[in-house]
Image (cartoon, rainbow, N blue to C red):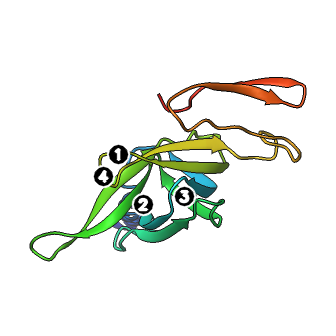
């Protein structure tokens, strides 16, 4: 009789150990996890800005990725796998000498978006940015096509060849 209970006790122990170890590796946030390949564009050059991805183990710190962008073109390609929204930070040292991160921009990444162009537009009240994410896939923006993004607060219209163009502001 005692022999038949041992496998059940052992099975229950293994099941509990498995469940507790799975719980330890659960994502810290209930936010959906996205996987995004993106490049950055900023009207003004970016430096000292970074984003973080969750570590593969809860005992490790988040993985920090420094980003740079020039105002004359796109940045390198970056990869992000983590909860949405993606948050961009600057590093700061407080009065006590502690390193702190200050969020300067964030954007919700659509779950279906895999390739993005992240546009950071500087706000007037310090080191904060309005963050836009555009679908940058080949399907959304095929070769040979022109995409106009109006980063001003005003609409504009003009003519390209024989076509009239009206572009509403993206930022309101």
Q: Quadrant of the N terminus?
A: bottom left
Residue of label 1: 124
* Residue most extreme to the bottom: 97
SS class, disc 2: helix
Residue of label 3: 81
Q: Which numbered disc flags the more N-terminal residue, 1 or 3? A: 3
Residue 162: give x, y in percent of width and height.
90, 25
Q: Nearer the viewer, residue 101 or 15?
A: 101
SS class, disc 3: strand
Q: Is residue 9 visible?
A: no
Q: CA distance from mark 2 to mark 1?
A: 46 Å
Q: Mark 2 near mark 3, Cβ–Cβ under 8 Å?
A: no
Q: Which numbered disc flags the more N-terminal residue, 2 or 1? A: 2
Q: Nearer the viewer, residue 172 or 52?
A: 172
Disc 2 versus disc 4: nearer the observer: 4
Residue of label 2: 22
110 sits to left or right of 54: right
Query: Relative to 21, does residue 159 appear above or below in the rendering?
Result: above
Query: Relative to 84, does residue 51 appear above or below in the rendering?
Result: below
Disc 2 versus disc 1: nearer the observer: 1
Disc 4 versus disc 3: nearer the observer: 4
Q: Residue at x 84, y 41 (%)?
A: 145
Residue 100: give x, y in percent of width and height.
24, 67
Q: CA distance from mark 2 to mark 3?
A: 20 Å
SS class, disc 1: loop
SS class, disc 4: loop
11 sits to left or right of 163: left
Disc 1 versus disc 3: nearer the observer: 1
Residue 113: give x, y in percent of width and height.
64, 43
Q: Mark 4 near mark 3, Cβ–Cβ under 8 Å?
A: no
Q: Which numbered disc flags the more N-terminal residue, 2 or 3? A: 2
């Amino acid at each position: 009789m005692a022999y038949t209970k041992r496998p059940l006790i052992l099975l229950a122990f293994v099941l509990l150990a498995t469940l507790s170890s799975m719980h330890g590796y659960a994502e810290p946030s209930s936010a959906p996890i996205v996987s995004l390949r993106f490049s950055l564009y900023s009207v003004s050059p970016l430096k000292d800005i970074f984003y973080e991805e969750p570590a593969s183990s809860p005992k490790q710190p988040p993985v920090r990725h420094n980003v740079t962008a020039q105002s004359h073109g796109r940045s390198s390609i970056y990869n992000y796998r983590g909860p949405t929204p993606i948050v961009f930070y600057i590093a700061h040292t407080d009065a006590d000498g502690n390193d702190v991160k200050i969020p300067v921009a964030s954007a919700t990444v659509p779950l279906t978006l895999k390739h993005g162009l992240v546009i950071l537009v500087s706000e007037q009240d310090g080191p904060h940015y309005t963050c836009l994410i555009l679908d940058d896939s080949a399907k959304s923006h095929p070769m040979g096509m022109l995409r106009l993004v109006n980063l001003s607060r005003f609409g504009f219209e003009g003519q390209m060849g024989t076509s009239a163009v009206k572009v509403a502001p993206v930022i309101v």
